[in-house]
């Protein structure tokens, strides 16, 4: 490989569909620009990698992924990080293995999900000059004390002093995050001759050479405690299947009556039986039509009435503009799709960034938040009724949809990604 050849871009992600699709979209865009790209995904997401038609490598097995998805703790705000991290620890050498296998002198750079930054940093034991770019899908993973709307399910009011917020983050990291994450991380680092890390999130924020925010400033403005060499690139475009036609049976359902309310707890959620039972009761009380979206049909009520339909998947870009509202978990991809469609959102967060994403949607005036642990038919009915009836919510939804339409085109977003890959973040 010639020394002046463009570097190989290793695009690494992990998680459910909302985590995978933005990175696959970026990898496709880079490939179309002539970049050499290699996807790195968990084994249980191999089908998504195959569908991308890009070169790829996997880590871990499909069985490991299914065991993780089958663990109820995955959707617990206190246990979830441990479930995810324990699944990654045996495979922290995955990027290092790829880098070691490259021909001598071949340049490469890693573009990765923040949870895989420790994996990429471990590869520096084989290539000390490896450039790492972290791409943040949601602002909560930056752990800012300045624009801190929530710490898990704990709402942080705006009047809370900055010092108190900083103390809260230190306590969370010291008592909950570091004891859980550092043993596996430092064990792997020791095996490859790298020094231990004292703080997990400090390492995750500091190890990259550059960081990107895949969300716009009107959703989360840059903060003083975000990492250096940070650039915002905006939400990625709709998922690759966004322009796909709706299934014929779904088209018929949509044509038969008023726009339905869409309910989804996320593609990876397999423990949402109570969520769907409550949703069915809420639709009955409101007298509305509904659409249940989940690939895991076993968690649905046994019998759905004619005014409620189930689908395993549906392209949101085609579906949501024809929906009355969406009730979802607060995943950043689903939130962005609802912003584009200009419809109200009721966010029912379970874990991870979902709480913060929900409160940001509420701050924009387009949604409400109902914590999963406080979920009831009465609360869901009241909040949905208000969202559907309030003129100010409809106005805010239209305003946010216009902001989405005015955001950077795919080419502009890729320009910012390439600048970060090439150390031109300034």
Image (cartoon, rainbow, N blue to C red):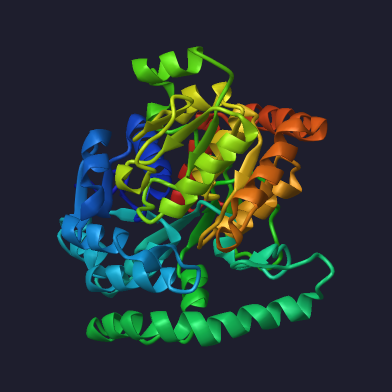
Q: Quadrant of residue 52?
A: top left
Q: Residue at x 21, y 41 (%)?
A: 55
Would residue 219 be seen by someone viewing this image from the given angle? no
The percent position of residue 413, horizontal first and vertical second, equals 53, 37
The percent position of residue 363, horizontal first and vertical second, equals 75, 49
Q: Is residue 407 left or right of residue 390?
A: left
Image vertical order of residue 96 relative to residue 321, above or below? below
> Which residue is at the front of the view, 340 or 268?
268
Q: Quadrant of residue 370?
A: bottom right
Q: Residue at x 32, y 35 (%)?
A: 31
Image vertical order of residue 316 relative to residue 177, above or below? above
The percent position of residue 30, horizontal first and vertical second, equals 37, 37
Would residue 204 be seen by someone viewing this image from the given angle? yes
Q: In this view, does 294 lie to the left or right of 219?
A: left
Q: Which residue is drawn at 26% across and 46% down?
A: 38
Tally the marks.
0
> Which residue is at the front of the view, 357 or 207?
357
The percent position of residue 343, horizontal first and vertical second, equals 64, 31
Q: Residue at x 61, y 27 (%)?
A: 324
Q: Is residue 337 left or right of residue 18?
A: right
């Amino acid at each position: 490989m010639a020394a002046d050849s463009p570097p190989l871009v290793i695009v690494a992600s992990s998680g459910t569909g909302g985590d995978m699709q933005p990175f696959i979209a970026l990898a496709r865009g880079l490939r179309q620009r002539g970049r050499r790209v290699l996807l790195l995904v968990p084994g249980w997401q191999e089908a998504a990698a195959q569908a991308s038609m890009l070169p790829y490598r996997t880590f871990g097995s499909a069985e490991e992924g299914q065991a993780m998805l089958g663990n109820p703790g995955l959707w617990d705000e206190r246990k979830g990080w441990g479930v995810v991290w324990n699944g990654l620890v045996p495979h922290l050498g995955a990027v290092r293995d790829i880098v070691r296998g490259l021909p001598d002198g071949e340049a490469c750079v890693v573009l990765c999900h923040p949870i895989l930054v420790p994996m990429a940093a471990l590869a520096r034991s084989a290539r000390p000059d490896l450039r790492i770019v972290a791409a943040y899908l949601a602002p909560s993973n930056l752990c800012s004390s300045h624009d801190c709307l929530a710490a898990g399910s704990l709402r942080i009011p705006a009047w809370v002093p900055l010092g108190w917020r900083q103390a809260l983050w230190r306590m969370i990291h010291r008592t909950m995050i570091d004891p859980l994450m550092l043993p596996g991380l430092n064990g792997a680092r020791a095996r490859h001759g790298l020094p231990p890390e004292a703080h997990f999130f400090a390492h995750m924020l500091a190890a990259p050479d550059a960081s990107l925010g895949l969300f716009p400033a009107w959703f989360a403005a840059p903060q003083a405690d975000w990492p250096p060499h940070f650039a915002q690139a905006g939400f990625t475009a709709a998922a690759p299947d966004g322009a796909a036609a709706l299934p014929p049976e779904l088209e018929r359902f949509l044509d038969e009556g008023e726009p339905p309310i869409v309910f989804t707890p996320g593609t990876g959620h397999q423990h949402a039986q109570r969520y769907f039972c409550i949703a069915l009761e809420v639709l009955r009380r409101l007298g509305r039509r509904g659409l249940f979206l989940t690939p895991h049909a076993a968690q649905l009520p046994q019998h759905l009435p004619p005014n409620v339909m189930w689908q395993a998947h549906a392209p949101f870009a085609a579906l949501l503009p024809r929906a009355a509202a969406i009730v979802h978990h607060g995943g950043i991809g689903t939130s962005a799709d609802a912003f584009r469609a200009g419809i109200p959102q009721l966010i029912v967060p379970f874990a991870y960034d979902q709480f913060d994403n929900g409160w940001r949607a509420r701050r924009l005036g387009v949604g409400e938040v109902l914590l999963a642990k406080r979920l009831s038919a009465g609360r869901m009915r009241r909040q949905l009724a208000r969202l559907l009836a309030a003129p100010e919510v409809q106005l805010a939804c239209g305003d946010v949809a216009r902001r989405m339409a005015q955001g950077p085109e795919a080419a502009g977003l890729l320009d910012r990604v390439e600048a970060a890959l090439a150390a031109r973040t300034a």
